[in-house]
Image (cartoon, rainbow, N blue to C red):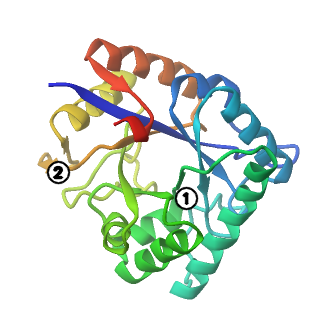
Amino acid sequence: MKYTVDINCDLGESFGNYKLGETEEILQYITSVNIACGFHAGDPTVMRETVKLALKHDVKIGAHPGLPDLVGFGRREMAISPQEAYDMVVYQIGALQAFLTTMNAEMQHVKPHGALYNMAATNPTLAEAVAQAVYDVSPQLILFGLASSALTEAGEKIGLQTAHEVFADRTYQADGSLTSRRQPNALITNVEQAVQQMVQMVKKGTVISQQGTEVALRADTICLHGDGEHAVQFARFAKQKLAEERIAIKHLNKI
């Protein structure tokens, strides 16, 4: 059986004098990039530079809209209404699209960030607002969401192509949700364990939860976090191991 998967990474999250991640280095190992749009991270100059680098490396570009929380890096929940979620997503997609237009480039997808992503994964009303925002900007955009979540369900219901996303370096709960970052066991720091989880998710369509149960999920795209201490080294190692497992890394339109 032939296995293929998209690899995505959250980038463009530097801000002013604060540099986060090694953008150009990690772009060599991924096929899709989620670029911060200024609410949780990123700024206009960083957005432009990240778009330029992504095009140089033939990496498909997506908007990464988050909550307006620079201090908390968009990872703290906020009590927002569905209308506010809709407006935030439309606004941030528009900001990134402007830079793409100046470079005659197209946007492939939209992936919410952090708390907005997790809230939309479990709240159907919020998920519908996010999916509607993406659809209203362009029905051709692909919506990235947590595998088998309220967000992917909302995207499919409205008629968007959706990409079910899994995470290499995050642990899962028995209901298929990600372990909260507030918990000490939320992140997988052992690279061998993270790669083993990636391979299982792609080949078997399952992941072992923190409770020891095997949870079914669909893996269209795998997220590698670009803000980790050894992000580039892990991305290089992951690509090598996936090749050894005969898992091809391709753009979503080729899967």
Residue 41, horizontal then vertical, whole percent? 71, 55
Lower sequence index among marks 2 and 1: 1
- The residue depicted at 47 percent of the width and 63 percent of the height is 117
- The residue depicted at 72 percent of the width and 56 percent of the height is 96
- Pick the residue in front: 12 or 63: 63
Picture quarter with the C terminus: top left
Q: Is disc 2 placed on a helix, strand or loop?
A: loop
Which residue corresponds to mark 1?
113
Rendering quarter of residue 21: top right
Which residue corresponds to mark 2?
211
Picture quarter with the N terminus: top left
Give the alpha-carbon distance from disc 2 to disc 1, as whole Å: 26 Å
- In the displayed structure, 116 sits above or below 16; it is below
Amino acid type assigned to the residue bearing label 2 in the image:
Gln
Amino acid type assigned to the residue bearing label 1 in the image:
His
Do the CB atoms of the residues marked 2 and 1 lie less than 8 Å apart? no
Residue 235, horizontal then vertical, whole percent? 49, 24
